[in-house]
Image (tube, rainbow, N blue to C red):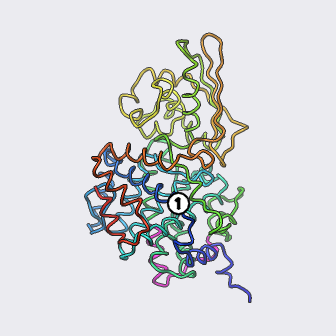
Amino acid sequence: MTLSPARTALAGQVGDFAARAELSDVPAEVAERARHLILDAVGLAFASTAYGFPKVALEALSAFGGGTHPVLGMPDRLSPRDAAVLNGVLIHGMDFDDTHIPAVTHVSAAALPAAISAAVSRGATTEDLLLAYILGVEVSARVGIGGAGGFHDVGFHPTAVAGAFGASVAAGKIAGLDAHGLASAQGVVGSMSAGLLEFLADGAWTKRLHPGWAAMSGLTAASFAKAGWSGPPAVYEGRFGLYNTHLAGRETHPEAVGDRLGETWELVRTAVKPYPICHFIHAFADAVLTLRPEIGATGITEIRCAIHSVPGKVVCEPAEAKWVPRDEYDAKFSLPFVVSAALTRGRFTLAELEDDALGDAAILDLAQKVRVSEDPDSAFPAAYSGAVEIELADGRVLRHREQVNRGHDERPLTNAEVVAKFRETIGRVAPAATADRVLNAVLSLGDGTAAADFAEACRG
């Protein structure tokens, strides 16, 4: 029998897989890692409430009316779609959330808000929620992989682009869509998948909004598909599909979208961040902290950093915002600042993004000694490499290369380390009793209790 174009298209392959998937099909270690990725995301959502941007987002969303859906880390309630937007903002707002390395995509920040909103609004269980989240991550990661590291180079944020597709599958699964409906949801959301990197020019807040908007788009697309709205079957590989429009003329791998679904679990390749900065800089922070004890009292003449040109555009351009960051968000995406602050203070934590660090003359003066060059040996996009040379006043040159960044699936943070990070982040704003409540709720995901109870346990 000849399959229809819809079933042979990549969205159809994803739809077939997702429609059949059950939580019992997911290996136990994958499900357990998923719970810990969710734990990391929820802890970050709580920690974000100490900053001003969630309040602005809440004010903007409240203009559309209220609702009954709980919000992570906050006492407020919104409609399901607006709660998904705000939850995405909270998870991703500090840029401390997980990243699927080959996809260059923050996978939890869109998949989790979509899964929570869909599960709560439809009266689903935590088993449904956990499975939907896992499917959302698997799809987002594969869509990002298909871009072969090129989305950033042309100014698209893959978290926003790929995250919308994953969110549509997560929401569609909970909505009970069949294979055709899930394919349609992906086709519909393809017209919503976008997110520009222009924020890099002036430190605008748009990147913080991207995953929440992707989650909302996924929820919307799934609802339209459930109502019978059609989407183009070849949304990924078609003449005017995702890859031929967003990455025209560049190397892409659309076949990655449907590659080995249910056999290879991309979720376990998702990196939990050890530093609250752009993932492209982590290897450099580790490199200079490794070299720091060898410097002694000798002055530093020059710091030479080698990086691949694609991530280099993100963390080294425009130069005026990278060598003298205007605010903490600039600093997160500044290779010179992070290297200088880590050398000056012997660490890089959330404290190094506060006003006293941003105005620290010692950090800013040392940043002026940072020189950046192309790294011909970088592993990007498979890993985010960092090579550093520090030239000292006494003539010595110290060298260190981190070819594979810490947090990568080859060097992952353990589940115990994720729990420790969770307690540190949520502990900035909530007492130990709240942390224990949230921890128990997250690590119990999949026990068949009501998703609404889980969401209530994760409120502020």
Q: Amino acid at mark 1?
A: Ala
Q: Position of residue 134 (x, y in %)?
A: 52, 65
Residue 317: name its quadrant. Answer: top right
**Quadrant including the C terminus:** bottom left
Res. 305 image quadrant: top right
Q: Residue at x 54, y 77 (%)?
A: 182
From which residue to which does the magenta span run? 216-235
Q: Does residue 346 appear to the left or right of 101 in the view shown?
A: left
Residue 220 counted in the magenta span: yes
Outermost residue on the bottom side: it is 1
Q: Residue 409 placed where, x, y %?
A: 60, 50
Where residue 71 appears, x then y in whole percent? 32, 60
The vertical placement of 223 against 375, above or below, is below
Q: Secondary structure at mark 1?
A: loop
Q: Is residue 250 magenta?
A: no
Residue under pointer 1: 194
Q: Residue at x 60, y 15 (%)?
A: 392
In depth, the one of 272 and 394 nearer the eye is 272
